Amino acid sequence: QVQLVESGGGLVQAGGSLRLSCAASGRTFSSYIMGWFRQAPGKEREFVASGSGVITDYADSVKGRFTISRDNAKNTVYLQMNSLKSEDTAVYYCAAKYPLTSTWSYWGQGTQVTVST
């Protein structure tokens, strides 16, 4: 069982930056694939980024602007978001899944990111 707690959301102007953090419980953090998703009002939840520590993947909409990283010693995954746009406004969720599976098994409660123009 893994518990995920996001932090770092807030209000930022367009063009600015934010770094989200997701702290995970448990002693097997390094074995999970970690991901970030987001959900804007009236829209479905969408994939943002994922990382195993070796391989990363990004949605086309955030490539070149967002970076996922992890610190296994701290059981924490980060999402560095640069050049933020108004369309990045959403609730951002941290998630974890086992390798070689398609189902994201564990989710955080979400953190709000609002980008003002």
Image (spheres, helix red, strand yellow):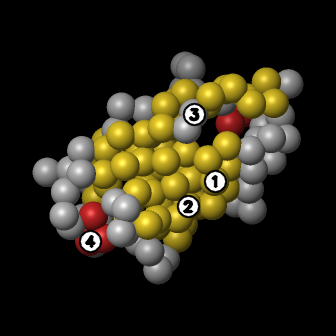
Mark pair 3, 1: CA separation: 11 Å
Secondary structure found at label 2: strand
| Up/down of 30 relative to 95, above or below | below
- For label 4, the residue is 31
What's the mark number on residue 80?
Answer: 1
N-terminal of the pair, mark 3 or mark 1, is 3
Mark pair 1, 2: CA separation: 6 Å
Q: How many marks?
A: 4
Kind of residue indicated by mark 1: Gln
**Are circles 4 and 2 on residues that touch, CB within 8 Å?**
no
| Up/down of 77 relative to 86, above or below | below
N-terminal of the pair, mark 1 or mark 2, is 2
- For label 2, the residue is 68
Res 99 seen here? no
Mark pair 1, 4: CA separation: 22 Å
Callout in the foreground (3, 4)? 3
Which residue reaches farthest left?
A: 1
| Up/down of 81 relative to 30, above or below | above
